Image (cartoon, coloured by chain):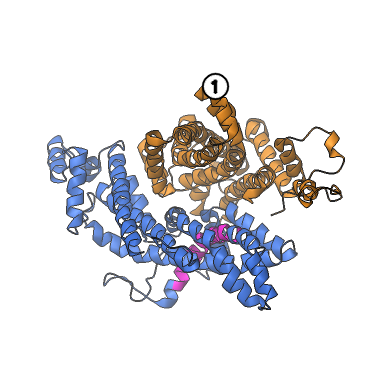
Chain colours: A blue, B orange
Amino acid sequence: MRTYILRRLLQIVPTVLAITFVVFVMMRSVPGDPVVSLLGDAYTEEDAIKAREAYGLNKPIVIQYLIWLGKLVQGDWGASILTGRPVLQDVLIRLPVTLELIVLSMGVALAIALPAAIIGALRQNTWADYTATSVAMIGVSIPEFFIGVLLLLLFSIGLGGLLPSSGWVYLPGTCPTMVCGSSLWGNMQHVLMPAIALGVGRAAILTRLLRSSMLEVIRTEYVTTARAKGLSERPIIFKHALKNALIPTVTVMGLQVGFLIGGAIVVETLFAMPGLGTFGIDAIIARDYQQVQGFALLTALAFVVMNFLVDMTYTFLDPRIRYA
Amino acid sequence: MADGGDALPTKSRPIRGGSLGEADLPVATGVAWGARARPAESPFVQGLRRLRRSAAALVGAGIVIILLFVAIFADVLAPQSPIASDQTHTFERPSWDYPLGTDQLGRDMLSRVIHGTRISLLVGVSSVLLALFVGVPFGLIAGFYGGRVDTVIMRVMDLILAFPIYLLAIILMVIFTPTAGLIGTMKVTGAIAIVRIPIYARLVRGSVLSIKEKEYIEACRALGVRDPWILFGHVLPNCLAPIIVTTTIGIATSIIVEATLSFLGLGTQPPTPSWGWDLKANVSFIQANAWLSLFPGLAIFITVLGFNLFGDGLRDALDPRLK
């Protein structure tokens, strides 16, 4: 097991390197020159050459990447070409916002999906099942930003501004600088709509998946055996059926991280949240190479680490799965 | 989700006599007593029969057909030009003249929503077809030949898959530089297709790995049939069911990705009508003109729902094991 974990951890390194390298090359093939935006109206050819030299942009791409990597292993994520601010500092300010959004949206997803899927599977072909599956079908068909707009219409406009339509208040203890205000109530007000907008789609996918796995599991012989030996329904469902039905669901939850990152970009843009999503999209559009690299690195890490954790969860859900 | 329908005849009578296994066989495979005289139905016809019984699939197919009709005849159906602005009629509320109101430039929202169907369907369908045309041959070759070819193709596919889908699509769109009109639409199509190629390559490779071990493929080889004919004439038709299902549901996903890119300002650029862009542009005026964001959003939702319902029905009908 220990060897397996070590091997998997080592596999993370080439994947992250590959993703960051491809992003590095792709960003440099974007038409336009960030030095032009940096210098603005004061652009002269002489200053442009100096700026390119200062940021190492005149070197071959592979050398530029190796320089970036060399600095990275020393803890230096580089500095934004446009603002001059250290990328790591910007990322750390924005990380808690996106982390909170993603964790809460997964919470929303599970809070909806678990009961809906269990009820749907146990009462197959009843009105409860039809409701759960129909709502799930609607859920997978609505993009996050439209759910966000509907929530805005309901809570920010319809109910007289019950919830704020944009901005952010940090959760106490997560504010990385002295300047940002934090309050639990304010934070909850700001995060509720984005978390629901991002969570509903995931809830729908998980409900569909978990319901069909539950349907398969409750027809297996070990569930019949559990019933035959007189076990009450609750431990049968939660201890025997649900745990096994969760295995494919957990895999999909891991794969959903890629979509969650995209969803976070959209939801943060809609609700004007100062998270990593808005940071990433702004950096990509402005062609701020260093900021994009920071964003890509973090995204790649989140993606591979999540998939690693998914593999580890299997051993908990099904003790027969042992990694040699 | 309504079930795809049970193809087993309820009144079928098992064969009497013989071993228990024989007696069970007709019931298990759904062949009714007396059906022996008729020629066996192909799996495709059986699938169609199951599809016809699924109410949800029929609703989905209905939505898709209506949308196709709207997209093809958008010029005739739209009461006004989707790009002509009229400064004297900005932010009109829904009325008889403007059934869905007008936007900040006085453009008729109904006409924009109708024309938006074109972009959405065009990108949704063509990006999936493009991904199919590239991904399927790669998957066939990787699965059929194995070895180094397989390793090289699949490592490249894995690299694309390792990217969070939106990160790759967004960067590709920035490289392609979003523009308006047909060229702009083709750029979005290309970006979404690249992201989706590995999905089809993986899917087909998986099916090919099991199909190539079958005896009929061995027979083809023994008869001296050339590889391309074996691949496209014998292997491909046998992995069509999962491809068709993934394609239909893939169109729904592509439509959402296109709308999302447009929402982020990276899709087809204005004045070309695009639902995602219209929704984003009108969110700024949501306080006073709530309906403006509502209609493009509803259009995206109904389109995606149509393809999802139809795709689900197809999956149940063509491959009940995938349920």
Q: Does the magenta-highlighted stretch encompass residue B150?
A: no
Q: Is residue A135 left or right of residue B106?
A: right
Q: Which quarter shows the C terminus of chain A?
A: bottom left
Q: Is residue B212 left or right of residue A36?
A: right
Q: Nearer the viewer, residue B212 or B296?
A: B212
Q: Nearer the viewer, residue B36 or B314?
A: B36
From where the camera sits, is residue B83 visible?
Answer: no
Residue B251, quarter of picture: top right
Measured as percent of width and height from the top left, residue B58 is found at 73, 44
* A207 vs B62: above or below: below
Measured as percent of width and height from the top left, residue A26 is found at 31, 40
Q: Which stretch did the figure color magenta? A: A188-208
x 53%, y 21%: residue: B224
User: What's the chain of the residue with tag 1?
Assistant: B
Q: Nearer the viewer, residue A208 or B170?
A: A208
From where the camera sits, is residue A223 visible?
Answer: yes
Measured as percent of width and height from the top left, residue B137 is found at 49, 31
Majority secondary structure in the magenta region: helix
Measured as percent of width and height from the top left, residue A70 is found at 17, 51
